[in-house]
Amino acid sequence: MKVLFLNGPNLNLLGTREPEIYGRLTLADIEKQVRTRAGELKVEVDFRQSNIEGDLVGWIQEAKGKFQAIVINAAAYTHTSVAIHDAISAVGVPTIEIHLSNVHAREEFRHKSLIASVCRGQICGFGVKSYILGLEACVYVTE
């Protein structure tokens, strides 16, 4: 099984960006933990990050036939991107939406996800464990 992990804008700043909200781990630290769990589950993972919406859309489109599932932390694009919504819908690859923080306990504009309706589920508020739970959810939805 192959799972594509996509990370949106500003996640390259993890570890230094608002650590009281996002924690002190870097995206590389999170990737290492995901790879460890993926090894235990015998799952291959590909981790990518971009601040550019079009990169994320392109990677989603390329996932069909190459990956059995996608885990996406679209970050701010969660709340604004019809393009990411449409790409997820178009490819039909089971997708899990994740967030480090509990977006529903934050600013009002973060409460609405434009991608949730085309994802198999949403995991938020568990810090780095949101990524691990997203990986485990992929195994579950593809059984």
Image (cartoon, rainbow, N blue to C red):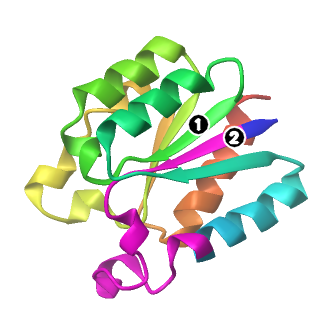
Q: Quadrant of residue 104?
A: bottom left
**Residue drawn at 48 percent across, 44 percent down:** 72
Disc 2 to disc 1, C-alpha distance: 6 Å
**Residue drawn at 34 percent across, 30 percent down:** 84
Whether residue 76 is visible, yes or no, is yes
Which dot marks residue 70?
1
Q: Quadrant of residue 28?
A: bottom right
Along the polypeptide, which appears first: circle 2 or circle 1? Answer: 2
Mark 2 element type = strand
Front-most of 55 and 32? 55
Q: Which residue is mark 2?
A: 3
Where 2 sits versus 38, above or below? above
The x and y percentages for residue 86 are 34, 19
The x and y percentages for residue 135 are 67, 50
The x and y percentages for residue 82 are 24, 26
Q: Which residues are magenta?
A: 3-28
